[in-house]
Amino acid sequence: MQAKRWSWLLTIATVIVCAGFTVRQPATQLYRIAEGRIHFKSDAPLELIEASSTKLKGLIRTEDQTFAFSVANESFEGFNSALQREHFNENYMESARYPNCTFSGKIIEPIDFTKDGSYSVRAKGKLSVHGVEVERIIKANLAIKGGQIRVESSFIVPLQEHNITIPKVVYQKIAEEILVEMSATLTPQK
């Protein structure tokens, strides 16, 4: 009887001690874009075309460092003319058929999202433009401060990779490679 009592007490003591040392994983935290901007520039020999959108949407999931960003093609503004914007949406991006450009994947370098700091990272994922997905690694700078994440990136999108063709008539007016710049501030999703 004495042995059973000691066994019982030992079991309870073990449970209590182990409970004190339980490692708790941080809860999954989603950060959503509170403010974002994406800008593109086509710098061709005969024409400079630039447009921007403040309708960038996106999430970062800190637990596994995954992300997803999206922008509606029709949200871009700032073209040289209304006709240029129309051609962008109808002839090149075919926005009725392919309404969004997206980039989703995973941040390669490990980041401690609980501490303020700056990180130079590579984001690996699928970039979808004009309905064509291409696997890319895109460099970005992340700054974590006061519970917010600031993301900035600049990268090139070759039109040919996304089956966007430039008619010979306007070949000197549209660059074959488009410079894309994005910046966003993400806050915890509630």
Image (cartoon, grey):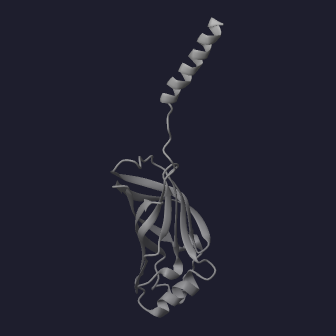
Total number of numbered labels? 0
Question: Depth check: 2 or 49 in front?
Answer: 2
Q: Position of residue 28 (x, y in %)?
A: 51, 50
Q: Quadrant of residue 165?
A: bottom right
Above or below for 87 versus 20:
below
- Residue reaching furthest top? 2
Q: Is residue 128 left or right of residue 114?
A: right
Above or below for 159 versus 3:
below
Task: Please say whether residue 21 is visible from this viewpoint.
Answer: no
Question: Depth check: 50 or 25 in front?
Answer: 25
Question: Depth check: 43 or 104 in front?
Answer: 104
Q: Position of residue 72 (x, y in %)?
A: 53, 76
Residue at 47% from the left image edge and 63% from the top image edge: 32
Residue at 53% from the left image edge and 64% from the top image edge: 103
Above or below for 151 versus 117:
below
Task: Please say whether residue 138 is visible from this viewpoint.
Answer: yes
Residue at 42% from the left image edge and 48% from the top image edge: 111
Of the 4 image quadrants, the one containing the N terminus is top right
Q: Is residue 35 left or right of residue 12?
A: left
Residue at 49% from the left image edge and 93% from the top image edge: 83
Q: Position of residue 57 (x, y in %)?
A: 49, 69
Q: Is residue 7 left or right of residue 77?
A: right
